[in-house]
Image (cartoon, rainbow, N blue to C red):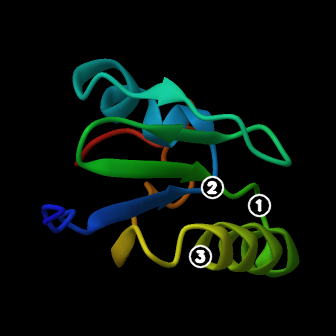
Amino acid sequence: MQAKQTAKALLTFAHRGEAQAFLRQRNFRPRTFYFEGLYENDSELLLLTGEGLQSTAERLAAVCGAFREEVGSVVNLGIAGSLAPHCLPG
């Protein structure tokens, strides 16, 4: 009998800068796919969607379709423009 695989969370970010802490701290490695920007570790997938609704929709649909048996949830994360040098805390 085959053990049931635990569903992975799919973490999505528009840009690498938003995802950099996750990529470093959670040991993500690139996953071969039709386009660059898909990474995985033992329990999660991480997708860099690019900016804009169309790019996000296309990439998210492709990954969700291809990995429908693996993905249990999708979590969108980002920092909404705060990478700009003029955006200071406080």
Dot 3 lies on which element? helix
Disc 2 target residue:
14
Residue 67, placed above or below residue 48: below
Please give left or right for residue 24 compared with residue 31 in the image: left
- The percent position of residue 33, horizontal first and vertical second, equals 75, 44
User: Between 90 and 72, which is closer to the camera in this rendering?
Assistant: 72
**Quadrant of the rendered image containing residue 36:** top right
Residue 10's place in the image compared with 90, above or below, is below
Dot 1, crowdedness within 10 Å: few (<14), some or many (≥20)? few
49 lies left or right of 81: right
Disc nearest the viewer among 3 and 1: 3
In what element is the residue under mark 1?
A: loop
Q: Name the residue under label 1.
A: 51
- Residue at mark 3: 64
Crowd tier of the residue under label 3, counting other residues whose Cα lies within 10 Å: few below 14, some 14–19, many 20 or above: some
Quarter of the rendering containing residue 5: bottom left
**Distance in Å between CA atoms under marks 3 and 2:** 16 Å
Residue 76: % across, % down = 43, 70
Estimate the x, y position of residue 27 in percent, counting from the top left.
Answer: 30, 22
Q: Do the residues labelled 2 and 1 touch (CB within 8 Å)?
A: yes
Q: In which quadrant will I find the N terminus?
A: bottom left
What amino acid type should be assigned to the residue bearing mark 2?
A: Ala
The secondary element bearing badge 2 is classed as loop
- N-terminal of the pair, mark 3 or mark 2, is 2
